[in-house]
Image: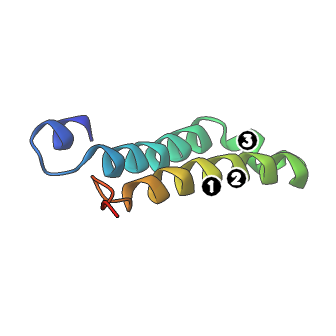
Amino acid sequence: MIALYWCNYLNIATALSFAVALLKLVAIVFQLNWYRTAKFHSVTIFETRFALFYIAIAAISVLPARLPSA
């Protein structure tokens, strides 16, 4: 994803959101036993934190590069 940013295929916000999704997948794969056996509350907190971080990056990515002047 960093290589895609450096080659100008993705902007920084898109690369960051892709990185967050990939990080979540890696965290689940390496902690699969915990993910399967944890209490629902713990999994909900885990999912909510990643979702809020992803939404924050996605919201920033749709902002214009320069705000229009009045």
Residue receiving disc 1 = 51
Badge 3: few (under 14), some or many (20 or more) residues near its Cα, within 10 Å? few
The front one of 14 and 59 is 59
Badge 1: few (under 14), some or many (20 or more) residues near its Cα, within 10 Å? some
Q: Which amino acid does label 2 sit on?
A: Glu
Measured from the top left, where is residue 29 in percent x and y? Answer: 57, 42
- The circle on residue 33 is 3
8 sits left or right of 18 in the view: left
| SS type, badge 2 | helix
47 sits left or right of 9 in the view: right
Marks 1/2: CA distance?
6 Å
Looking at the image, do the residues carrying marks 1 and 3 touch, with CB atoms under 8 Å apart? no
Name which residue lies at 76% across and 50% down. Answer: 36
Residue receiving disc 2 = 47
| SS type, badge 3 | helix
Name which residue lies at 44% across and 53% down. Answer: 60
Q: In this view, does 21 lie above or below 70?
A: above
The N terminus lies in quadrant? top left
Q: Which of marks 3 and 2 is nearer the N terminus?
A: 3
Name which residue lies at 72% across and 53% down. Answer: 48
Marks 3/2: CA distance?
16 Å
Measured from the top left, where is residue 31 in percent x and y? Answer: 66, 37
Measured from the top left, where is residue 15 in percent x and y? Answer: 32, 46
Looking at the image, do the residues carrying marks 3 and 2 touch, with CB atoms under 8 Å apart? no
Q: Can you tell which of label 3 and label 2 is closer to the viewer? A: 2
Q: In this view, does 1 lie above or below 62?
A: above
The C terminus lies in quadrant? bottom left
Q: Earlier in the sequence, mark 1 or mark 3?
A: 3
Marks 1/3: CA distance?
21 Å
Looking at the image, do the residues carrying marks 1 and 2 touch, with CB atoms under 8 Å apart? yes
Q: What residue type is labelled 3?
A: Asn
